[in-house]
Amino acid sequence: MDHENKEISPVWYVFIAVLLWSTGGLFIKLTTLDAAQVTFFRSSLAALTVALLTYKKGLRINLFGVFASIIYATLLFLFVWATKKTTAANAIFLQYTAPIYILVLAPFILREKFHLRDLVTVLLCIGGMSLFFVGQLRIDDYQGNLAALGSGVFLGLYIMLLKHPQARRMNSTITVIYGNFLLAAINLPSVVNFKALVGSAPGVAIFPALTWTDIFAVGFLGIFQIGISYILFIKGVTGGTRPLDASIIGFIEPLLNPVWVFLFIGERPSNWALLGGAIIIATVAGHTLLNSGIKSKPPAAAGG
């Protein structure tokens, strides 16, 4: 008997990856660990996961890759730190201001032309960003919001570096592997008490006390929320998913991230933050769709 061979659509790989990404805020909030400790465990597991599953594509890295890995590591740490300091909604919505910095910097880094509609997009997103700083905020909220803005800047830089011609010379996951290994190494002192390790601080624990919730949370973050999700996303995009479709599906992440946190932890963002996030997501989505429509138009008969 012949069986019809039905393969999974590449769009589903992207969709599953984005769903995994959207759980970041929830599992970061669930841990009792601080930002540096969460970063160490998550990045260690993510680097090992991606390296073990993609090493056949090569592990060589050049100077450009090292720079991109540093940018990637920085954006990861800033996002974890922001999620610990402010609401999950603020952290993810402000990280999604990355397109603003791409629009501003792409003409200099990638030689892309800046259009009037790009300026309108930037102004609308800045207006949405400003709403996150309205109302009564604690000092931690300000620090978290600024860290989230920083993660957006570095995310924008990282995306532009991935589009750079030199990025095609390496394994597409190489910056994820080395960026996470770098981040784990930097945050190692926050996890291991070296004085206790060499015996100069007797009676002090070498490693922080981990609850079962901590172990489950950082395990899920490293293996699935970063490691598996990134591999699935690349598989979906290289397997045939249009960049436009991938970017639109990506908007699910900032929408679901605060939802999971609200449902399981009860953390509710302010009304101003919700309004600002809606403005940012709607603006970025509208700009993406508009640009796609312009690029897909057939050329005129006269070549104009």
Image: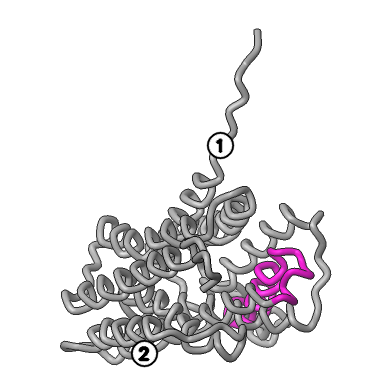
The answer to which quarter of the image holds residue 278 is bottom left
Q: Earlier in the sequence, mark 2 or mark 1?
A: 1
**For this rendering, which residue is in front, 9 or 254?**
9
Residue 57 visible, this orientation: yes
Q: Position of residue 264 (x, y in %)?
A: 29, 56
**For this rendering, which residue is in front, 165 or 135?**
165
Is 69 left, or right, of 105 in this rendering?
A: right
Is 255 left, or right, of 275 in this rendering?
A: right
Residue placed at 32% from the left, 73% from the top? Answer: 283
Bounds of the magenta segment: 165-192
Q: Position of residue 27 (x, y in %)?
A: 42, 62
The residue at which mark 1 appears reads as: 8
In the image, residue 212 above or below residue 82? above
Most extreme residue toward the front, as rendered? 302
The residues tagged by marks 2 and 1 sit, at their Cα atoms, a distance apart of 43 Å
Amino acid type at mark 1: Ile
Q: How many marks?
A: 2
The answer to which quarter of the image holds residue 1 is top right
Tag 1: Cα neighbours inside 10 Å, few (<14), some, or many (≥20)? few
The residue at which mark 2 appears reads as: 143
Q: Position of residue 162 (x, y in %)?
A: 64, 73
